[in-house]
Image (cartoon, helix red, strand yellow):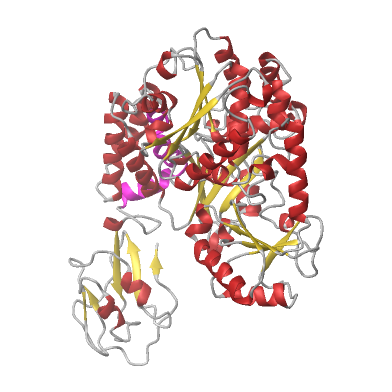
Amino acid sequence: MSFDEIRKQAISEWETLQNSPKPRILLGMATCGRAAGGMSVFEAVQKELSLRNIDAIVTQVGCIGLCYAEPLVDIVKPGKPRICYGSMTPKTVPQLIEDYLVNDNPRPDLALGTIGEATVEGIPRLFDLPFLKPQVRIVLRNCGIIDPEDTNQYIANGGYTGLVRALQMTPVQVIDEIKKSGLRGRGGAGFPTGQKWEFCHRASGSPKYIICNADEGDPGAFMNRSLLEGDPHSVLEGMLIGAYAIGANEGYIYCRAEYPLAIERLNTAISQMKKYGLIGEHILNSDFSFEIHIKEGAGAFVCGEETALMASIEGKRGMPRPRPPFPANAGLWGKPTNINNVETWADAAVIMQRGAQWYSAIGGETNKGTKTFALVGKVERTGLVEVPLGMPLRKIIFELGGGIAGGKQYKATQTGGPSGGCLPVTLLDIPVDNEALTKAGSIMGSGGMVVTDQDTCMVDFARFFLTFTQSESCGKCVPCRVGTKHLLTILERITRGEGKPEDIEQIEHLGQLVKSTSLCGLGQTAPNPALTTLRYFRDEYEAHINEKRCPALVCTELIRYYILADKCQGCLICARECPVQAITGGKRLVHVIDQEKCIKCGTCLEVCPRLFSAVIKVSGQEIKVPEEPVPVIAGKKGAASSEVR
């Protein structure tokens, strides 16, 4: 069967599905949806349909990006728009099915929006929501829309037309198309993709390999996972195009074992591709043959570095090696190898589908196209976003993300994961692209974006990420192995209130030394959290060192809890809830916290009735309180105050 016939059949099936006389229910069942309770919702849907004897088509789809509203359930009634419902629970499912499927009440109060051109009164279009409207969905265009386990749905929506086009061109022409698009690697370094392919194409040696780096290890990052779970064929098509361009007949997807659903859907996709002749010998009746293997990684963060990744595929310990030689000349098993990350391969597929000129019109002057980001932290709307490169950081956080959760004050955004830097409020209008972020001391990385608020201690924030990178260092080179350990030791000392004035200069000197002398990208970027927090939040470091005070009231050794005599009503609640019995005092007696026993857990502050607000949390100061329980002062009432900064 020719590809034209395959595509014609796929489109026919897709149109038949869209016009099905049966109602359709689509559930967001990527890892994020499942983590939010999606499986229970899925079971509730099946149970309710069975009880009511409703014949419906139930489909699992990937993540559309609205993580803050998971679990998501979409319903399509025959002849009516697809309606997306958010924050579903097993309890709301029966009522929704009765109200909408049975009684034709679309429940606007539960709906997030409609998908498609048609509308329903009282329900906005989903892609007009503030979270989605500014986005330009290229890589994520199919995620949450199609069934990721049905190849026909991908083909019906333009899938593999990029491969067909590539096979009608010469490898050099394909490489030129990618170069004209301006696509740069989405894994962190931002190197021009077409140029990278060209190096490998020209390299002597055989066989040649391509690799998809899906070893996404940044805390809080889920861009690659969501794409693999929601639209695996876009990545696989990109790999086929890249393999044809450089002359490779074998490739690997290196995916961490902690992504079981992504691996499952990749295996399903590859199996289906074989049925259509999209993989294996003589793909689509051409002279091009290609096989893909999936290698499961053990979760080492350093294996995101390309030479460590290749060592792991070869069965060796995942440790980087010096470059040159670069992988394009001597990579996997010493042969020419091209490595791109998940998003880069998916971009390559859509570029070949729609053309370099179309793609290069999106984004900035030197940063073409879009970038996906995992927007997490202290924002109202967390989720997966895809925006044109160059969009201001402010717009991403305050327009898409809805601003800071709880109406609190913005403090900083960390881009680029544990190896990235922290950007303060003065840099909110920075364009999010490779050059601007690097100039500010951060990196784009693979797309992590962690937002912090006024309650975040930037010294402790840097300590947390140094803890991660130090433990993930492979230990091969001294600057990284020893330097990150010393940096972490200094930060730990500062957060304990044992910092010295000279520590600031030590962090700056040691951080630059580790960056400039480490063997691989892990060590070369590991000091970024410490260096940027020191650069933009030096006053917090000085408060910790000089005043033994944590302005954000986070560092345990620098905070204390007190019970105010003029507000305590002797209700016994805090004494009962204290896990270490550090609070003494009886009924109608002012309670006292034993500072020697107190473990700074904050339970007393949490349970003290707001009416009293007798417990306060302070740093860098002593509060005068009774040393022993005394009678409650008659007629006194608490005021709403709990923290003194």
Between 474 and 89, the one lying in front of the other is 89
Q: Is residue 98 visible?
A: yes
Residue drawn at the location 57% of the way across and 32% of the way down: 186
Q: Main secondary structure of the magenta part?
A: helix
Which sits in the foreground, 367 or 370? 370
Camera sees residue 365: no
Q: Which image quadrant is residue 70 in?
A: bottom right
Up/down of 6 relative to 65, above or below: above
Residue at 69% over, 56% down = 130
Residue 458: percent from left, percent from top: 41, 48
Q: Position of residue 220 (x, y in %)?
A: 46, 48
Say how many tags the image has: 0
Q: Quadrant of residue 10?
A: top right
The N terminus: image quadrant: top right
**Image coordinates for residue 565, horizontal then vertical, percent:** 30, 81
Residue 526 in the magenta stretch? The answer is yes
In the displayed image of the protein, which residue is found farthest to the top? 204
Position of residue 208 relative to residue 624, above or below, is above
Q: Going by the picture, which residue comes out furthest to the front? A: 1
| Magenta segment | 522-547
The answer to which of 266 and 577 lies nearer the viewer is 266
